[in-house]
Image (cartoon, grey):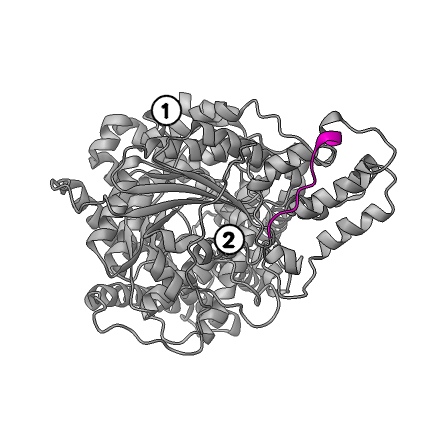
């Protein structure tokens, strides 16, 4: 019997955990970034913040500041600094993006890639087998004949036994379909230490020596052939570069919410990405996927340690990508963002609820960065700023909610003082005797301009870009910006509440766990939507009632925030629907280039899914009763168990023990938990041992079992420790 070889020969390299509390030696040859750009961003943001804070102070200090007014001013200053930075970053990104439109593509062929070895890594966790293996097959076929050596390596962290068996069946099929010059490999980890970061680390320490570069995909990533080759070329040209990050565009959106995100990423993403790349230069960031990494640089400089304490702040680092980028730069490697490099795509969450679930995990990871900032020495200040922006992207939501609450308390206080400060006529702001209404109006107008400037820049960019003019057109681009802005204004308060809830959850010590991201677009039931959106809806009603008690004018002023909260249930339910998304597409709204002309990589991946549509993977029960099947699949099973000497893997030990009480194979399988099932599937020796228990009983078995042999894998780490 010919066994399918699932993994290449190991070529291990060391990846030591980095010491956070001690600086490392940095090469004197490390290229430096231009300091003036960073100073420009910093000084401009702080100057604009100082002006806005001064104007707010003048608004409130007509008759002296009360304690509540001082609190309001302090919270305003903290919030507005983030808004001012976003404005300055978008402004510089806008001019940089316009400049990139005028650049001519490189004419030279670049460096010779024939001697390079690159692995395209696919870390997955309980994903749709049809979806992910379609992407892998399409990628392998796309890279056939490319200069240099490319391998595709599926790094599974799957813990669902049914999905694991489906992956094995899909791998057998993909090896029949993949080209001979692009090998596809498969490894499923037996123990999921440190989640995705641990998955990548396991690969690097066992096979990293085989490859010069690693291109990391997410489960919903797609990249064009030319983009992959250009990434390798740029790494070959820059021996001091450790990582190059692309700016992924969204693709494949069907629900209305996904289309909103896809349009925004396509139009505003280049502006914001060019801004970050302009000032960060060689001290960029890493977003975990759609990037190329120099394998030996990551191994030597970016091994993540565990943080002291328990989750949610301690333990393994969830948002590993920001920290890995910071450690690479600390060790002297360049980390670059390439916004002008097109052909990089991913899919976004299809619903508000799915975004909230993902955001909860990201929130915990970003809050952990507080501890990283406190404990890590030797980080570049730009890397520290990347970490701070990640933290503040979540802290800004509770701060804005506090700002609204303090403002309401101040209004309530003033409304019950004589004389009445809310007249019968309409005015944008409550007519408090303690504020300067003219300054307040001017500050409001300037703040709105700053807030919406990135969207205006995106519109101008779209109207100028040949790609947008050719594939979308001027009218549909303008209509898309108006539509996206209106819908985003309604959705923003919902995200403010959900992110505030996530921050509170983390700060009170609740761990997010690790659940796979939902990638299908079938929405949620009305009751499920109501359950998820009830807090936001309740807060919207409370704020509206309180504002009406103060004054109808104040309620109207607060309406942009409260309307979205009150409508959170219908908004979440409606925007999750494919039908709503298709309706907007037919109307010509929220159209982006990636849906007018589908990227070749995405179209090929969708087409390749049919190869796996008729998979009929077995189950643990039928496998248990067929030792021939056991022997055939054993080459697919990774025999590496990352256990200390004499350490016992509890789920596997329990699976062994349950054979003592089960009277039949069916009863035995029914008694196992998912964790015990996957542990048994990950151990050929124990599966064969359990199988022999039931094969030796008086119950009749299938002919294949009666004629099958007893398989015992060769000595491994499993043999001595599991």
Kindly indicate the quadrant of the structure image that contains residue 88: bottom left
- Could you tell me which quadrant the C terminus lies in? bottom right
Q: Is residue 170 visible?
A: yes
Residue shown at the point (54%, 24%) measured from the top left = 613
Kindly indicate the quadrant of the structure image that contains residue 164: top right
Eyeballing the image, is 368 above or below 295?
below
Q: Kindly identify which residue carries mark 2.
A: 199
Give percent across and percent down for residue 550.
Answer: 58, 55
478 within the magenta span: no
- Badge 2 element: helix
Give percent across and percent down for residue 246.
Answer: 32, 47
Numbered mark located on residue 588 in the image:
1
Eyeballing the image, is 365 above or below 485?
below
Eyeballing the image, is 594 above or below 100?
above
Viewer-nearest residue: 135 or 363: 135
Marks 2 and 1: which is nearer the front? 2
Give percent across and percent down for residue 108.
Answer: 12, 42
Q: CA distance from mark 2 to mark 1?
A: 42 Å
- Badge 1 element: loop
Image side of residue 623 versus residue 661, left or right: left
Q: Which range is magenta?
A: 705-714
State the predominant SS element of the stretch in magenta.
loop
Viewer-nearest residue: 580 or 134: 134
Q: Is residue 421 visible?
A: no
Residue shown at the point (31%, 27%) measured from the top left = 476
Mark 2 is surrounded, within 10 Å at the Cα level, by few (under 14), some (14 to 19) or many (20 or more) other residues, namely many
Residue shown at the point (36%, 32%) measured from the top left = 601
Image side of residue 499 versus residue 688, left or right: left
């Amino acid at each position: 019997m010919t066994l399918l070889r699932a993994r290449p020969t190991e070529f291990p390299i060391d990846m030591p955990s980095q010491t956070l509390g001690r600086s490392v030696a940095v090469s004197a040859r490390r290229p430096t970034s231009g300091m003036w750009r960073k100073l420009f961003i910093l000084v401009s943001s702080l100057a604009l913040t100082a002006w806005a804070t001064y104007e707010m102070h003048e608004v409130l200090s007509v008759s002296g500041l009360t304690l509540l007014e001082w609190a309001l001013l302090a919270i305003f200053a903290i919030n507005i600094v983030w808004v001012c930075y976003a404005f300055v970053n978008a402004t510089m990104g806008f001019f940089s993006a316009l400049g990139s439109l005028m650049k001519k593509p490189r004419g030279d062929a670049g460096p010779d890639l024939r001697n390079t070895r690159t692995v395209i890594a696919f870390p997955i966790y309980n994903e749709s087998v049809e979806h992910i293996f379609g992407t892998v097959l399409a990628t392998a076929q796309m890279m056939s004949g490319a200069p240099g050596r490319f391998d595709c390596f599926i790094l599974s962290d799957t813990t669902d036994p049914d999905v694991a068996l489906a992956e094995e069946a899909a791998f057998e099929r993909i090896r029949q379909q993949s080209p001979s010059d692009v090998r596809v490999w498969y490894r499923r980890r037996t123990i999921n230490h440190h989640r995705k970061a641990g998955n990548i680390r396991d690969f690097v320490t066992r096979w990293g020596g085989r490859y010069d570069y690693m291109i990391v995909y997410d489960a919903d990533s797609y990249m064009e052939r030319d983009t992959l080759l250009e990434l390798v070329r740029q790494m070959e040209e820059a021996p001091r570069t450790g990582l190059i990050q692309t700016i992924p565009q969204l693709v494949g959106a069907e629900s209305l919410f996904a289309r909103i995100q896809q349009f925004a990423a396509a139009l505003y993403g280049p502006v914001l990405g060019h801004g970050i790349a302009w000032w960060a230069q060689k001290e960029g960031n890493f977003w975990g996927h759609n990037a190329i990494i120099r394998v030996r640089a990551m191994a030597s400089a970016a091994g993540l340690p565990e943080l002291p304490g328990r989750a949610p702040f301690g333990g393994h680092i969830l948002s590993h990508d920001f920290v890995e980028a910071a450690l690479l730069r600390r060790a002297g490697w360049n980390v670059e963002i390439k916004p002008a490099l097109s052909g990089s795509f991913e899919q976004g969450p299809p619903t508000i609820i799915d975004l909230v679930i993902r955001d909860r995990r990201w929130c915990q990871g970003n809050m952990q960065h507080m501890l990283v900032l406190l404990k890590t020495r030797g980080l570049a200040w730009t890397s520290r700023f990347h970490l701070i922006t990640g933290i503040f992207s979540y802290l800004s939501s509770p701060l804005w909610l506090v700002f609204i609450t303090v403002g309401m308390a101040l209004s309530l206080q003033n409304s019950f003082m004589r004389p009445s400060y809310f007249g019968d006529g309409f005015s944008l702001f409550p007519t408090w005797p303690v504020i300067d209404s003219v300054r307040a109006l001017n500050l409001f107008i300037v703040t709105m301009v700053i807030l919406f400037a990135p969207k205006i820049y995106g519109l101008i960019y779209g109207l100028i870009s040949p790609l947008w003019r050719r594939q979308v057109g001027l009218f549909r681009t303008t209509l898309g910006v108006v539509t996206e802005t209106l819908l985003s204004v309604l959705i923003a308060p919902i995200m403010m509440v959900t992110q505030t809830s996530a921050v509170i959850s983390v700060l009170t010590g609740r761990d997010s766990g690790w659940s796979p991201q939902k990638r299908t677009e079938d929405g949620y039931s009305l009751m499920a939507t109501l359950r998820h959106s009830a807090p936001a809806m309740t807060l919207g009603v409370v704020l509206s009632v309180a504002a009406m008690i103060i004054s109808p004018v104040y309620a109207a002023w607060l309406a942009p925030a409260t309307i979205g909260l009150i409508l959170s249930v219908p908004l979440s339910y409606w925007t999750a629907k494919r039908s709503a998304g298709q309706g907007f597409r037919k109307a010509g709204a929220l159209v982006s280039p990636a849906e007018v002309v589908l990227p070749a990589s995405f179209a090929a991946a969708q087409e390749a899914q049919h190869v796996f549509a008729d998979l009929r993977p077995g189950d643990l029960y039928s496998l248990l009763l067929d030792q021939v099947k056991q022997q055939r699949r054993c080459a697919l099973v990774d025999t590496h168990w990352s256990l200390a000497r004499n350490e016992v893997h509890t789920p596997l030990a329990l699976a062994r023990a349950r054979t003592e009480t089960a009277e039949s194979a069916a009863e035995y399988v029914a008694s196992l938990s998912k964790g015990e099932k996957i542990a048994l599937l990950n151990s050929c020796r124990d599966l064969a041992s359990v199988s022999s228990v039931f094969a030796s009983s008086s119950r009749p078995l299938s002919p294949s079992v009666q004629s099958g042999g007893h398989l015992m894998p060769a000595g491994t780490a499993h043999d001595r420790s599991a």
